[in-house]
Image: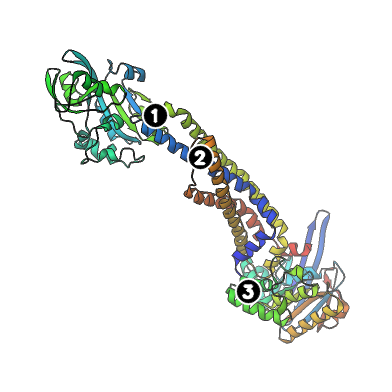
Amino acid sequence: MLRADNLSKIYKKQDGKVIAINNLSLDIPTGDFVAIVGPSGSGKSSLLLMLGGMLFPTEGEVIINGESIYQLTLNEIAKLRQQQLGFIFQTFHLIPYLTALENVQMPMLLKGLSSKEQAENAESLLEKVGLSDRMDHKPSELSVGQQQRIALARMLANNPSIILADEPTGNLDSETGQRMIQFFFELNAEGRTVVLVTHDIRVAEQAKNTITISNGTISG
Amino acid sequence: MNWNIFVLRELFQRKSKLITSSLAIVLGIAAIVSISTITTYSEESVAKELDALGANVLILPPEVSVADYYSADFQNGELPEEYVTLIAMSNVEGVDNMSPKLTLPTDIKGNRVILTGILPKSEFQNKTSWQGAGIFSRPKICGSAEDVFKMNQKLPQETLARKRVITNLEHHEVLVGADIAKKLHLKEGAEIAMLDSPFKVLAVLPTTGTIDDSRIFAHLHTVQALTDKDALLSAIEVVGCCKQVSKGLISNLQSLLPEANIVTIAHIVDTQVKTNALMRNLSYLLLMIIVIMGGASIGNDMYNNVYERRKEIGILIALGATPKIILKVFIKKAALLGLLGGISGYIIGTVLALALGPLIAGVHVFPILYLSIIAVVLSICIAIGASYFPARYASRLEPSIALQEN
């Protein structure tokens, strides 16, 4: 269960305050596939980051499996991300000087797995996303679709129960994007909760549930 | 993969950045290593020169100058013999050997000679206070006196001239300088009368080309007794440890014996000693500069690095990195930068020293291995010290800000 209670995020700028999320509450049951949609600047990315323990809310709380995550220490939040959460970003956020294999190894390195275990698991994950022949390539040597699949493999490295994806198809052509969505459905079928931010209504329509955000609140 | 590989990949991703960020520390370490290497060999050269001089410090009565001592060789002023005990019992470092002397003019068969009372080494050994707390129990810093103190070893007679030490000299035995022996036709075993007492010639000393060739050496206490100068001395010749002579031995002796006139003949190598001191001070100055400049350079570079890498920091945090891991990554990076800077600085500094040593100090220079450890440790400490705050800043970055900017 992933829950947000009276969540607010206010950014302080030089010319005043910007309310990104305004007293928002939601419940996402375990195993759900939720698409969060809304126009640019509506606050959907801020919401996703707060749901993932990446952005402290100004008010309210985020509860994952009964635990209010922003009451945890930074180390405990990090462990939570390490063990339960998987992120996918629009721009992939791969580490440019590491190979595909090493990028996928990173979460396992953070978890403290041995180099051998890291390599074996990473190879298996890259095979799963169809990149077994690109393991030693750096991100710059790969297409955007391949880069997104590396990001997907990396996200799966620590077997997360909750997947948070921010515009995962935003930089992909429609065919590659559809293949990516298919991956999310497969992961959801395995029992993982998927929360996907998108502005693409066709992608959102495929989700089990859709939440529309406008001006920092749920509008529909 | 491990964190070392991760850090190496990041560092070598932009080699030019790596070079520029470590340039200040490399140059600073190189300067310190080269100066220290040249100074060390230059000091060693001075030490050897001073060692070659034999007795290099004179303790004279206040009214006697070193010129008086060497020209007239005897004078009116006197020193108490207890000064020897004071020095032997003191904690003044660098006294490798002492030779208390009482010098007087006297006659042998109507010939005017210089009689010098000296104390053989056996007297020092027998005197518990001198032996127990004194100079003979001290570690041999220079090593110049090491051979001199081997009690059972018969020393060549040149030792007296060279090191101002004679092992055994009985109360009615004398050593005769080469010139006076020739003049008086004295040989080993000959009998002579001085101060109304009989003496036996223990040995004729080899020619030294100094005033010693005109001296007759007898036991100090015999000379004191025969001349009514009990417990009085004309001078104490000191073989000062070579390095200590240029590092405060004179001032320490002067503090110990404020009434005495303490002079050194180290002025022969004075210029080199001053140059060494200058270079040593220069290396301290450079050390301060490198700590400030090198530290500021690396610290600044690390702040830039944190700024440039904030997206990657955000990724690591998103993947579950704790603040401690982020801190560790940046500290490792700084340590590696310091290691590379230290090694490069040591190599460059040593090469510079090898090339410039003969030109600057006129000495042949060889690599000093222990400096490599100092260079690396210093460099790593500066790099880590300068990087700590940027690293801490990185560990506390809010990941969302870095990631949202993209």
The numbered mark, 2 or 1, whose residue comes first in the sequence reads 2
Find disc 1 in the rendering and name its residue.
Answer: B251
Image x and y of residue B189, in percent: 14, 28
Q: Which of these two is toward me, B337 or B321?
A: B337
| Circle 1 residues within 10 Å: few <14, some 14–19, many ≥20 | some
What is the three-letter code of the residue carrying label 2? Ile
Quarter residue B163 falls in: top left
- SS at mark 2? helix
Q: Is residue B115 visible?
A: no
Q: CA distance from mark 2 to mark 3?
A: 51 Å
Find disc 3 in the rendering and name its residue.
Answer: A108
Query: Is residue B73 toward the left or the right of residue A96 in the image?
Result: left
Residue under mark 2: which chain is it in? B
- SS at mark 1? helix
| Circle 3 residues within 10 Å: few <14, some 14–19, many ≥20 | many
Image x and y of residue B274, in percent: 48, 30
Quarter residue A146 falls in: bottom right
